[in-house]
Image (cartoon, rainbow, N blue to C red):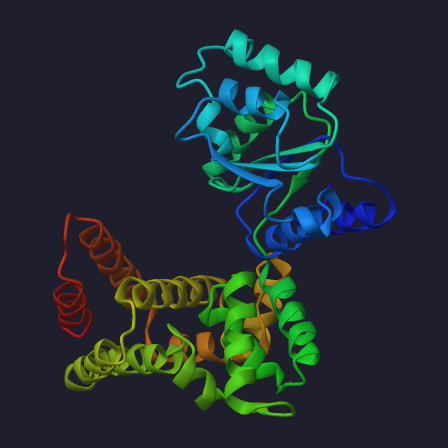
Amino acid sequence: MTPEQLLTSLKKQAPAPVYLFLGPDGYERDRCRRALREAALPLDLRDEGLTRHDLDQISLSAVVDDANSLSLFASERLIWVTGAEGALPKRLTTTEDKDPADASSQMKQFIKNPAPGVTLVFDSQRFDFEGDDKAKTERVRKFYAAIPNVVEFPRFTAAAARQLVTKLAGELKLSIGTSESEFLVEALNADASRIANELEKLSLHSGPGGVVTMDLISELVPNARASSVFALVSAIGRGDRLTSLSVLDTLVRDGEYLPLALTFLATQFRLALVAHEAGVKNAFQIQSHFQKLGIPMWKSRAEQVAETVAKLPRARLARAIRHLYIADQAFREPRPDDRSVMESLVWKLTA
């Protein structure tokens, strides 16, 4: 079930007794949480009827016992259980392993015969649906297989995030261009919750009917100093160590989170290396090539990749990516000095 399907169903009928929320996205989850609270609880019971539990702190059996208990203060209850993955057994040795007997049987019994007026939500947002997290997500899904109502919250794609920017900007009466929208999405890594928060901040600053510019985004949005990052890429491409260190100093003074700056650099260099290997050079060719590969690529990003391709030959890009990998490992060391790691990287890239 998608978030939109859940929201539509809540407008037509009462909430189901039990839900499982899966996935990392917080924006759609918040919308569904608010809708469930309004649908499951009368207005005068919005506070008394809401109970929160965390399965990293209490047992699944205790949660089900609470759901089966009558409340002295509320006839309708919404029980929100975070950390749903915390109830999983620590190890599964075969695909036929059984759930812990007591907790599993209690949960299944509640699903078959739910307590009147109780809505129980198990919320798992630790794992994604792709990459290494995919198997973990499926394990959570298997453990809670008895729950018929599963709502999935995948991360927003870049395209979906840009659509969200357009939608929210319209609601806030903000004017934002395509380039500015792409810039904002990239700076916030297509995180829908952060996009909503930052657009509201931009709205408060510029007022109704305001225009969102690149300078305004760079000034107000944390980690949106992408222009400085691309200036760093350009200086490294020229082998200009002094300018590279100066741009790095600007990033530090502006409060840029340096591991994120490293991520921008690594992404830019990897895309440029792929473009080199494919023999594409101008922005139009680069955009077409990556779109055929299923990788979102918009015009401004393609122009940035084209500039990097022009400045850095293939062999130098390959060496740079190896140095970026070493820097990424250094950031993962206990208590690293982020600035020293990045300065060392700049020295190597401009050698």
In the rendered view, does 127 fall on the left or right side of 338? right
In the rendered view, does 266 fall on the left or right side of 53? left
Query: Could you say which quadrant of the image residue 239 lies in?
Result: bottom left
Residue 64 appears in view: yes
Q: Residue at x 50, y 63 (%)?
A: 278
Foreground residue among 224 and 71: 71
Q: Could you tell me residue 66's position as x and y percent?
A: 56, 24
Asked if 202 appears above or below 194 in the picture, the reply is below
Asked if 71 appears above or below 244 in the picture, the reply is above
Q: Quadrant of the N terminus?
A: top right
Q: Residue at x 38, y 74 (%)?
A: 222
Q: Could you tell me residue 181's position as x and y percent?
A: 58, 78
Q: Quadrant of the C terminus?
A: bottom left
User: Which residue is at the far front?
Assistant: 72
Query: Could you say which quadrant of the image residue 231 lies in?
Result: bottom left
Q: Could you tell me residue 15's position as x and y percent?
A: 76, 39
Q: Residue at x 39, y 61 (%)?
A: 270
In the rendered view, does 208 fall on the left or right side of 8? left
In the rendered view, does 31 fall on the left or right side of 256? right
